Structures are given as C-alpha cells and as structure tokens.
Image (spheres, helix red, strand yellow):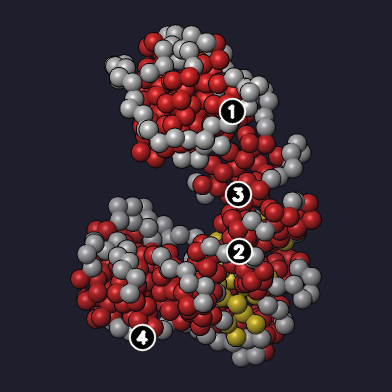
Amino acid sequence: MSLATAPRPPPLLLPSKAINIPNPPSFDPHSRILISLKQCTHISQLKQIHALTLRSTSPYHPKTFFLYSQLLHFSSFLDFNYALQLFNQIQNPNSFMWNTLIRACANDVNNKDQAMRLYLEMLEQALVSPDKHTFPFVLKGCAYLFDVSEGIQVHAHALKHGFGSDVYVNNSLIHFYASCGFMDLAEKVFVKMPERSLVSWNVLLEGFVQFGKFNSALNLFREMRNTFDPDGYTLQSILTACAGLGAFSLGAWVHAYLLKKCDFNLSIDVFINNSLVDMYCKCGSLELAHQVFKRMPKRDLTSWNHMIRGFAMHGQAEAAIRCFDKMIRTQRFRPNSITFTGVLSACNHKGMVSDGRLYFDMMVTDYKIKPALEHYGCLVDLLARAGFIDEALDLVSTMPMRPDAVIWRSLLDACSKKNSSVELSEELARQVVESEGDIGSGVYVLLSRVYASASRWDDVGSVRKLMTDKGVKKEPGCSSIEMDGVAHELFAGDTSHPQTKEIYQMLKVIDKKLESVGYSPDFSQAPMIDELNETKQHSLKLHSERLAIALGLLKLQPGMPIRIFKNLRVCNDCHEVTKLISRVFNVDIIVRDRARFHHFKDGFCSCSDYW
C-alpha cells in the first residue's frame, strides 16, 4: 500500500474567546499551559490554549516541543480532525506523536483505516522507528477492519524491529488474530510467548468464547489459575462459556468467587451481573437468575432482555410479559429488537397466539422497530404450531425479506404434527432444500414423518434411500450431564461410557417401574421405517437423554436435580417417560433441548406438553 504524505496546511485560525490561565509568578508559560491542558474538557478551550501557546512560547525552546506533544495528546480525545491538523504543523514529530495520532485513529470508528495509512507514512518518512506502543495501535485498527493481510505484515514488522518477545505487542497480536477468526494463529502466538500477563490469558479466553469454543476456554481457564487470579474480564468470559455449555457447577463457583474474593465494585458491576443472569438462565436455574436480577443495584436494557429471554426459554410466558411490562412502564426503558425477540419467543413457547400478534404489532406501530427475520420466524412458528398454518403461510408470503431454511423447517414441522396435506409438506421440504446449501437430516426426518402419518410406507423408504444416496446421516442425539464439575456426554445407544454396564442396569430398573405405572410407548417419532413395535421400543429406550437420566439417578445425591442438555428436540415418548420418572423416582429433572427448557417435577412438565 502506498500513501502520499499530506502537505502541511497553513496555521490554524484561532478563537478570540479568552480562557482563564493560572499565572503564579513562579511558573513559566510552559508550566501554566500544561496545568490548563490538564483541566481542559472541551475543544473550544483547547483551541484557546493552542492560541496562547503560539503567542507566548518560542518554537525553539526545548519545552515547547513537549508542550505540542501534550496538545496533540489532548486534542486526539476531543476532536480527531483538529488533532490531525495540529500534527501536520509539527516539524519532525517523534514516535510519541505518531503513536498518539495512530491511537486516535484506532479508537475512532470513522477513522480506523487511517491507522494503517499513518503507520505507512511513518515508515516512508523514516525519521523515527515504530516502538512497542505503535504496533498495538495499528493492530487494533486492523482487527476492527478484519484486515488480515495488513495485520500479518504488521506482525512481520514487529518481529523485524525486535518486538517478538514483547508482552504488550503479543497481546495485541492475539487479539488481532482472534478478532479475525484465526484462533489457531492466536493460540500459536500465545504458546510461543516467553512471558505472559493476565491480559494475555484474557484475550485468548475472550477469543475462544467469541467463536463458541467453550471447552477450550474452560481448559485454558483451569491452566491460567495456576499462575493468575481471575479478574472481571476473566470472570465475564468464563460465565459466557459456562452458559454455552450448561456448566452449572463452574458457573456457581465463579459466582461464589466473585462474592468472596473480588472487590465489592466488581460484584455489583452491571456487566458481570448480566453475565450471571444469562449463565443461570442457560444452565437451568431460573430461580437463581431471578435472584441475581432482583438484587442488582443497577440494571441496563441488557439486564431486562436477559431476564425476559430467560423466562421465555423456561416456558414462563406470563412472567416474561410481566417483566416486559415493568421494564417499559415502571422503569421507563425503551425496548429494542432483542427485547421483542424474547417476548415473541415467550408467546411462542406457550402458544399465546393473540398475544404474539399484539406484541408484534406493538413493536412495529408503537416503537417503530423494523421486524427482522427472527421476529418473523417467531411469529410464523407460533402461528404454525398453533394450527394457523394458512395464516403463517400468508405471513411468509408478505415478508419483506426472503425466508430462510429455519422458517421453512418450522412450517414443515408444524405440518408433520398437524397432519396437513402431503402435497404442502412436500413443497415446504423443497423450499428447505433450496434455502440451505448443506442439507442436514432434519428435513428428511420431518418429511418421513408426514409420509408415515399418511401410511405411505413406500415413500418413507424412498426418503431413507435418498438420504443414503446423498450420504446424509441422521444427526445423532447427544445429551450431556454435569456431575462434580465434569460433563459426561452420551449418544443414543452409547456403549463407550466407562459406566455403561451400570447405566444399562439402571435402565432395566426404570423400565420395570414404568411398566408398573402403566407406561405405554409412543412410536410416532421412532425410526423412519415401518419396523416391528418391539424394535421401535428398544430404539426409544436408548435415546441419549434416557441414558443421561439413568447416570444421574446412579451418581447424584438424593434431592439434587438432574440437569441434562440435549442437542435435539425431545421426542414425544422421552418427554412422557421423563415426566413419569420424575414422579416415580421423586426427582426433579431439567432438560434443555434445542428449542427450550423442560422442568419435570411430580409427573408434570413446565411446558404443559406444548413444545
């Protein structure tokens, strides 16, 4: 990249308004001006100080050069364009001045690209060399712009100038590579660092969390604890990772650590508490999330959004709506698009069609929020699952954007459950195929259920053959259960777990107790082919959540809830079985599937069998 050096402009026009400058007899003009600079809060004041500098100091005095560096420093925070003009008037600026302006570019959303241009001009003039402060500022601009090629060149320059071992520079490199999605390169820089600071660990942790590598984040955190105690940035990243994995035990440990070991101001920090609310909601403990929320001395819009969404995903639609009403009427917060996604999701999980229509209209009419695809998706799914498939199709046809595969799949799912016409289901399946390039197994499974409901077994077999021909495999069910801080993953039909023998023995105990209370299996979501009922029942028994429940019954202390996280939606039969287990074994079971949370207690589920 080449850059022509900008010509120096004529001296700036200076304001005539006076400013009070301290004038102790023992102070020279430079000292008085420096004191005024430290008290400066507005660009108009700085311009007056600049004018005074021109009038009362000699350009050849050794202190004047330092004075201009401070003028540039303060102006960079107040007015970037003025700082740029001031910089262009300075003859032979030193590295501090270059760094000051590059930093101002890196911190200004509208001038990020100028950070690299100034750096190149600095190299072209070759009057001063970049130092350990230069590279982090330039890399920050590259990270914001996702300018990978330029950032890699800056990395090479840093090595060439002897900063390959500098902690400050390496931290910025980790942030740059992580921000651009190159976690392997970020980790490589981290591993090669001869010395690391807490910031080094935090930056890599944040990168892992940003890209959903939650297990990597937790492993790195455990390693970090051997050297550093976590600070607020660490805890916020770890809480996000715990939320993503459903790691309740570690999340609760972080909360306890925060209360016992950290500064009081950190324990009441709104960002940390928002992360706690989100973590507890996503780990299945809505009660603890609500406790944290209620005790927060200060809340922002994100706090309310987390709580509304938490109520929604746990099936407490009425509580979500009460929370929304309090937010807008009592606390006077103005909702945003995320708020309405939570409210519409709450209506969807409870089948509250009229309320869903009402809040969608409120979003558009009262708050002038343009509906996004996720808002339409919530309303379409709400209408379709409640049986208003024609209205849902009409809404899809009037959307201002192209519907995605998620919307088409939700319509197909509703058709498979409502026994809609095979022809409509086939058309919806075709739309799913056209909307997503990499077709998963979901659309084939749903279509096969439509054919099975119509007893068109030849077509069910054709779907299975089509999957085989295309190399599409049904996504395996996987459930995880956390015990003593360790997550155990179990797949459908799993025999790889170290305690497989005990798990399957417990399954036999469960089967006998279910038979004693009159359990009858539901084959509607068993394998896609027309098998014998005995084969289907055996398949249902080996679903991953049942294996996880058996392990929980074996290993968890009596009275402790069983928390399970599944990658797929719970099938009808497993849902019924889990309700019965909660009653027969007198245990609370919390299941988070792909769509929502289910709280099973005393033979009932929080979803009221609507999911």
In this figure, which residue is indicated by the disc labeled 1? 23
Say whether residue 226 is left or right of residue 8: right
In this figure, which residue is indicated by the disc labeled 3? 237
Dividing the picture into quadrants, the one containing residue 12 is top left
> Alpha-carbon distance for marks 4 and 2?
33 Å
Q: Position of residue 277 (x, y in %)?
A: 61, 64
Name the residue: 46% across, 74% down: 328
Type of amino acid at the residue the image marks with label 1: Asn
Q: Please say if the residues under marks 2 and 1 sit with CB atoms less than 8 Å apart.
A: no
Which class describes the residues within 10 Å of circle 1: few (<14), some (14-19), or many (20+)?
few
> Alpha-carbon distance for marks 1 and 3?
50 Å
| Circle nearer the N terminus (1, 4) | 1
Q: Residue lying furthest front in this view?
A: 25
In this figure, which residue is indicated by the disc labeled 2? 298
| Circle nearer the N terminus (1, 3) | 1
Above or below 168: residue 454: below
Task: State which mark lies toward you, 2 or 1.
Answer: 1
Task: State which mark lies toward you, 2 or 3.
Answer: 2
Type of amino acid at the residue the image marks with label 2: Lys
Name the residue: 34% across, 59% down: 467
